[in-house]
Amino acid sequence: MVSGDSVGFSSGDATFDTKNVGTNKTVTLNGVTLTGTGNANYSYSASTTDASVITAKTLTASITASNKTYNGNTTAAPTFTITGGLVGMETVTATGTATFDSKDVGTGKTVT
């Protein structure tokens, strides 16, 4: 810039190509212009896209298992519940297996 000129950029916005998690996501810059005294005396050349990352959001989940009658194994019947972290109206289901800490009768058994 020439001494005495004050040139900057207006604030614009940027948008990702999709809302989904991924790497090398295209981000497009929109609505940026030169501002300040003497801005008409300058032009700029800048990339309007960038490759960025959207990382996965952490969900909070809980597991519960029904009581059972002794049957000689540690198999549990789990229920998984997503308790936090969802965005908007998105839904997530969880499935898996679970086991009691031992096959023996008892209360307060840990289920993994």
Image: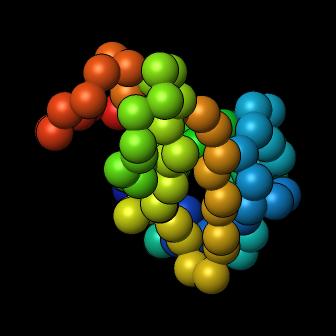
Relative placement, left or right, of 47 versus 92 is right
- The image shows residue 112, relative to residue 50, as above or below, that is above
Relative placement, left or right, of 58 versus 51 is left
- The image shows residue 54, relative to residue 38, as above or below, that is above
User: x and y percent of residue 53 in the render?
Assistant: 66, 37
> For this rendering, which residue is in front, 52 or 83?
83
Q: How many marks?
A: 0
One can see residue 92 in this view: yes
Write the residue at 50% across / 55% down: 79
User: x and y percent of residue 56 in the render?
Assistant: 58, 43
Name the colour scheme. Answer: rainbow
Write the residue at 54% across / 70% down: 87
Q: Residue furthest bottom?
A: 89
Relative placement, left or right, of 69 versus 75 is left
One can see residue 16 in this view: no
- The image shows residue 18, relative to residue 56, as above or below, that is below
Which part of the image, by quadrant, shows the C terminus?
top left
> For this rendering, which residue is in front, 43 or 67?
67
> For this rendering, which residue is in front, 100 or 4?
100
User: x and y percent of residue 5 in the render?
Assistant: 45, 58
> For this rendering, which residue is in front, 30 or 35?
30
Write the residue at 16% across / 39% down: 107
Write the residue at 63% across / 38% down: 96
User: x and y percent of residue 111 in the render?
Assistant: 35, 33
